[in-house]
Image: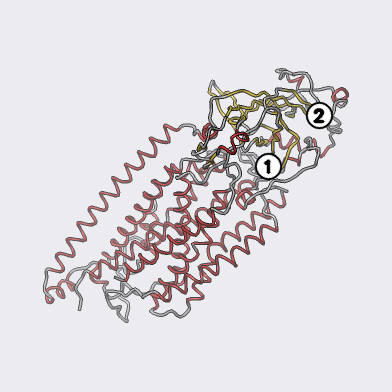
Amino acid sequence: MELTTVRKSFTYWVFLSVIVFAQVSNGFYLPGSYMHTYSNGEFINAKVNSLTSIETELPFSYYSLPYCQPPGGIKKSAENLGELLMGDQIDNSPYRFRMNVNETVYLCTTSPLNEHEVKLLKQRTRDLYQVNMILDNLPVMRYTSQNGVKIQWTGFPVGYTPPDGSADYIINHLKFTVLVHEYEGRGVEIIGTGEEGLGIITEADKKKASGYEIVGFHVVPCSIKYDPEVMAKHKMFDSISTVSCPNELDKYQVIKERERISFTYEVEFVKSDIRWPSRWDAYLKMEGSRVHWFSILNSLMVIFFLAGIVFVIFLRTVRRDLTRYEELDKEAQAQMNEELSGWKLVVGDVFREPDCSKLLCVMVGDGVQILGMAAVTIVFAALGFMSPASRGMLLTGMIILYLILGIAAGYVSVRLWRTMKGTTEGWRSISWSAACFFPGIAFIILTVLNFILWNSNSTGAIPISLYFELFFLWFCISVPLTLIGGFMGTKAEPIEYPVRTNQIPREIPARKYPSWLLVLGAGTLPFGTLFIELFFILSSIWLGRFYYVFGFLLVVLLLLIVVCAEVSVVLTYMHLCVEDWRWWWKAFYASGSVALYVFLYSINYLVFDLQSLSGPVSATLYLGYSLIMAIAIMLSTGTIGFLMSFYFVHYLFSSVKID
């Protein structure tokens, strides 16, 4: 009855948190969620994001290099919390187009390059930095061919270095192709019901809505050596004659001191049958999708098969033990307890308070908070609410949801503490610890990484103002909500143990092998459900690819929850059978040990899949972020295993008749 009350209360608060989060989300306008149409000749301004590289993972501002600046000066676009944390810095640019006007345009000619500018350009070129340009909220895309295979990339390189490394050449001419689709409003029409959200065009907006919508943005980068004296006579945005991309290196624009570089671009508008709701399809295509499908399905089948066998054997064993035990009279039960070993003998110690009980309560509470955040975020993303068009929305939503679920963390921590201690004394300390444990660890790691980014002058560094905003969210929203949850935990009915605990602890028999080996080995089964999806997630984060198969991720999450619960229950039963009543922490780490394999796999990914990653700074950043991810996975998966084992032990010993 007590556990039923706990589950109902917990479900209620999680549901309430989701509703509040949904209401908060309705208050935001998502940039790029609604279609914009352009009339012939209307100006369209392109924007530029931070320069990025898969070799260093250090983003830098676009205008840290000697590029042409817009006439009105550099203006930063409004950015949400997620974009700032991801290191995005979106600025205006001098690149502007006129709808359906094909033209070749001159931008500017730089002053003679000095030693610092040359060094910076060469370094960014050799580190394979990409320029990320945005038009109507679409990232620019380019296509390359390798071994006859067509590969698509977002962005274009800063420059080009030939295989012999004799010189470096800058990309100074861009050939843009803008795909447009003609649209005419007709009465009331629903558009954009795909991943970019919902928009409605009414009859009143028909005239305004009619026009051309941008459905594609491609680029072919070139390096062309211009005569700076001739080019400098032009003014910005002057039309020039069309130029062709050269194939000979001697016609490329070399990067060297005292060189003046002229920047130009041309744009061609091409009509397309692609509709606006489908314009992100080209970006969300995953390479090797067939392998992805078969790998995931194979993993699901294997894990379900193994888990099913283990669970069936376990159920039959426990049922047989219970049946044999309850069929005996009291005298026979006493004799059986003396003669047999097993879980029945630890009945007076199974609910003895574990070591470091406060830490366990805090970690379980934080695990519930992280698990709830991940589950609801993945569900929302699978339903299409987290569009890649809304940059940073996924991370922003996760942070908001984590803050709100502080209620659940406080409630679970204090409720578990009250169950162990039998009193509510010290619940404020438990609530404070739950509010500061995981965020404190994350803040320490992020602060160390931030100093590294500051030292590198990277846009990935968190500004001081954002630090204060995060502290405000932490101490003014998360901590109070956690304290409220803790207070509610003190008012909830306590969970009563079905058996009494002896005053003197029972001696645990010596074992041939340490129990922690079994605990560590148990994490391999949950890791088997996770590692394939982990590869695609790491690739999307560190190789600049889009990840949008949240349906797969939701299935993997559900499967992971089932396997973590089964593994921890089986391991708990095995420990009880050998008269080891110290099951609390072992149940937590039986499933939580999957985090160790996740971190080791991250190191493996760094060594074998991120071989281009250069320098100790980049490796430190990678390992720091991987450590935060591993800790979050440990808390969430460990919580699943512990709560399921607690329910199992409570149910098991409440089924046995004991005087």
Q: Residue 216: x, y in percent?
A: 59, 30
Q: Is residue 147 above or below residue 69?
A: above
**Tag 1 residue:** 50
Task: Report if residue 164 is visible in the image.
Answer: no
Circle 2 Cα neighbour tier, 10 Å, few/some/many (<14 / 14–19 / ≥20): many
Q: Residue 124: x, y in percent?
A: 71, 37
Left or right of 621 on screen, residue 332: left
Disc 2 on helix, strand or loop?
loop
Question: Residue 553 versus residue 340: which sits nearer the camera?
Answer: 553
Q: Residue 504: x, y in percent?
A: 32, 80
Question: Residue 142 versus residue 181: which sits nearer the camera?
Answer: 181
Instruction: Name the kind of residue labelled 1 in the image.
Output: Ser
Mark positioned earlier in the residue sequence (1 or 2): 1
Left or right of 322 on screen, residue 531: right
The CA span between labels 1 and 2 is 21 Å
**Tag 2 residue:** 261
Figure quadrant of residue 543: top right
Left or right of 103 on screen, residue 643: left
Q: Residue 642: x, y in percent?
A: 37, 63
Circle 1 Cα neighbour tier, 10 Å, few/some/many (<14 / 14–19 / ≥20): many
Q: Is residue 535 above or below residue 636?
A: above
What residue is at 62 percent from the left and 53 percent from the top? Answer: 81
Disc 1 on helix, strand or loop?
loop
Question: Which quadrant holds the C terminus?
Answer: bottom left
Q: Is residue 60 above or below residue 143?
A: below
Q: Is residue 261 above or below residue 547?
A: above
Task: Report if residue 371 is visible in the image.
Answer: yes
What residue is at 40 percent from the left and 65 percent from the top? Answer: 10
Instruction: Name the kind of residue labelled 2 in the image.
Output: Ile
Task: Tell whether label 2 touches label 1 (CB within 8 Å).
Answer: no
Figure quadrant of residue 6: bottom left
Question: Which quadrant holds the N terminus?
Answer: bottom left
